[in-house]
Image (cartoon, grey):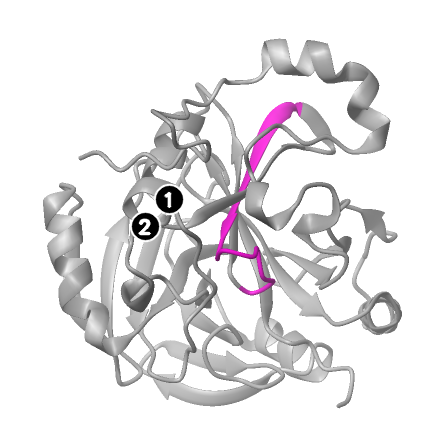
Amino acid sequence: MDDALLGLHHVTAIAGDAQRNLDFYAGTLGLRLVKHTVNFDDPSTLHLYYGDGLGTPGSIVTFFAWPGGRRGRQGTGQAAVVSLAIAPESIGYWIARLIERGVAYEGPLGRFGAAALALRDLDGLLIELVAAPEAPPRASWPEAPVPPEHAIRGLYGATLWQEGYELTARQLTETLGFRLVAEEENVFRFAVGPGGPGALLDVRCTPGFWAGEVEVGTVHHLAWRAATPAQQQGWRQRVAAAGLDVTPVLDRQYFQSIYFREPGGVLFEIATDPPGFARDEPVEHLGERLMLPPWLEPRRAALEAALPQLRRPGSNPHGYVDEP
């Protein structure tokens, strides 16, 4: 359809210590901190957005920081794995980099014919680096700690763990426009829009496995891309017509959002591509300071005093920590 979802917009997970999170995603994985803000629904919670050099939709991984929070558990009813795309010729580079940084990994493993490295971040979130020849290079920036040719090329996909997959599969295909494109044992791969890297969702059927607990080290929600607010409104009507509870459109400053849960319990969002992360600060200064929406500016002094402070080492203003 002309207004098909374009793939993943972002994935949001939960971190414990914000500085450790910054050190890992910016310092080790080489993503750019493109927005330093708060959870608009709970402004006492820091919200960090990472992505490519421009903060392009489809490259974004975000984290709510819950310092002192309880460690969560991957299980059913959850998006359990976040997959990031890399160039196939970069597998060796990433093996060497992970070893150098002391990050344990498994692989290369086979994922529907693609090689992947499986690892965990410092809070236990499951991550894959997937070799994807069809994933184009992403925008870099001068302070990037990873050479552009080896940089992460955006989101590849995500994996849901479900007790059963039939209801989820039906909602994906009949309501959201996904299509089943491959199967491997108990894993069913769906694609949306253009398909390929950034537009893939795997559903792993794990009957009898324990239920997931959404706390530190787990995914909070998956966000899918709508090209325009008008298309998002169309999707809201479709989701409601399918019998799912869906929120009103919410202003997230850098995109507009609606939220609902698919039948297996995973929280989905549909987010608009515009207006983007350069709405309130120039591209060359993305992520350098705490940005607040207009309705929270009167609380800036109190929030800055209460939120975790991030270390921006040396003369590098972006806080990209490139230390073992």
Quadrant hosting residue 216: top left
- Magenta-highlighted residues: 44-58
> Judging from the image, what secondary structure is the residue with disc 1 in?
helix
Is the residue marked by circle 2 packed among few (<14), some (14-19), or many (20+) residues within 10 Å?
many
Q: Quadrant of residue 73?
A: top left
- List the residue tagged with mark 1: 25
Residue 242 vertical placement versus 268 (above, below): below
Query: For this rendering, which residue is in front, 48 or 235?
Result: 48
**Amino acid identity at mark 2:** Leu
Cβ–Cβ under 8 Å for marks 2 and 1: yes
Q: Residue at x 44, y 18 (%)?
A: 68
Q: Residue at x 56, y 77 (%)?
A: 166
The answer for how far apart the CA atoms under marks 2 and 1 are is: 5 Å
Indicate which disc residue 29 carries.
2
Residue 188: percent from left, percent from top: 43, 80
Residue 98 point in image, percent of width and height:
17, 50
Residue 300 appears in the picture as rendered: yes
Give left or right: position of 177 versus 129: right
Residue 86, relative to residue 212: is it above or below?
Answer: below
Q: Residues within 10 Å of mark 1 (few under 14, many from 20)?
A: many
Which amino acid is tagged 1? Tyr
Q: Position of residue 170 (x, y in %)?
A: 64, 80
Q: Secondary structure at mark 2?
A: loop
